[in-house]
Amino acid sequence: MGGGHAHTHLRPDEVAVASLPSRILLVVLGLIAILTLVGMFQLWPDAAAVRAAGRDVEFSAPGVTYPHATITEVQPPCAAKKGETGTTSGPTCGQIAVTLDAGKDQGEKVLIPLLGPPAGAGLQVGDGVQLQRILPQAGEPANYSFFGVDRDHSLLLMTILFVVVVVAVARLRGLLALLGLGFSGLVIVKFMLPALLSGEPGLAVALVGASAIMFVVLYVAHGPSIRTSTALAGTLVGIGITAALSHVAVGSNRLSGIGDETSLRLQSLVGSLEFRGLLTCAIIIAGLGVLNDVTITQSSAVWELRAAGPDLSRREIFVSAMRIGRDHIASTIYTIVFAYTGAALSVLLLLYLYDRPLLDLLGTEDIATEVVRTLTSGIGLVLAVPVTTAIAALTVSAAGVPPTLRRRH
């Protein structure tokens, strides 16, 4: 009796899908896609408002330039003892000698004090740096100070290495994932950031932008199929859950959304920003990658189980896939917690030095924000697993349905 399915082996792309559930799924996704496009149209940033927001924002004072230079000498750090001096020409420690690379002062050699964090950056002879040049008064030499390290080449090399490794290992699928990543960047830079600056609500911008990203990223990376559509549906449900929870959590915990110096600086420059909505938007975006990971895994698990067991009932497939999902949830929760812990490590170290009770630390804006990020993203992630699994189990064919015939082109 058991021999009817013991030697039946299908490939996932040969698995038949149930007609009615698949049609319902595609109709729902189509409606969400339409709502996403309408939302983007309604929330599309007002170019005039964005320009007005940045009109009074100046990176530096008029006349200040940022020439590039090459380090020719790195002096040792100054000793802790006071009164230590060098030759009569000035101090011989804690400075770098540089040669200007371009501009009207090209070839000029100057000594630049190296103070603060740059002093511990491990600068070496031959490194490129960027200086700040203050326009000199009549008859006086220009005043130079250290501004930053030229990292263009090293970052470019790391980017190339990343692309090569991804394409070499994942091949076409990796290349398509990189294309999806590029599209995500365009949505964030061209739509979400300007929309937030023009005063649009952060929750609405996050929902529309995240939906647009997921529609393109999933179908580009994994191909248009019912299996991908089930993962997309689960992802969108997870986004909705995370959005609702983060909105409630930010309000109930009385978070201002201004938890660091960058936010304070932004508030001083763009006072019209609604920072609580901005925090909600940040929480939703931060959880997209992990959410996408678990939903596509659950969808693939259901298809693999149906391919391996054509006679399994949908309930049996759901139960088996959830065993996989629980293992994935456990590891992914660690990923979320450790990612946020790593991002806030400096804050944690500082608060640890204060030697305050743990509950007092949780009440600070910085730590409470990270806790809310972690918990809301985690809940949305966990609930997306059974939702995606259920949608996928309903979408695959019922037990005993023969495999689909693959078309050959």
Image (spheres, rainbow, N blue to C red):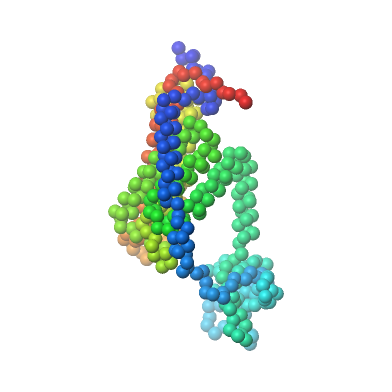
Give the camera-side residue of 105 and 153.
105
Residue 356, placed above or below residue 175: below
Give the camera-side residue of 155 and 6.
155
Q: Is residue 370 visible?
A: no
> Residue at coordinates 53% horizontally, 80% vertically from top-left?
81
Residue projecting furthest to the front: 48
Quadrant of the image for the N terminus? top left
Quadrant of the image for the C terminus? top right
Residue 228, placed above or below residue 102: above
Drawn side of residue 24 relative to residue 152, left or right: left
> Residue at coordinates 30% horizontally, 57% vertically from top-left?
254
Drawn side of residue 202 relative to residue 96, left or right: left
Which percent across, then down, holds residue 136? 59, 81
Residue 18, placed above or below residue 286: above
> Residue at coordinates 41% horizontally, 25% vertically from top-left?
20
Residue projecting furthest to the left: 252
Which percent across, then down, holds residue 80? 53, 78
> Residue at coordinates 34% horizontally, 51% vertically from top-left?
247
Query: Count the marks: how many?
Result: 0
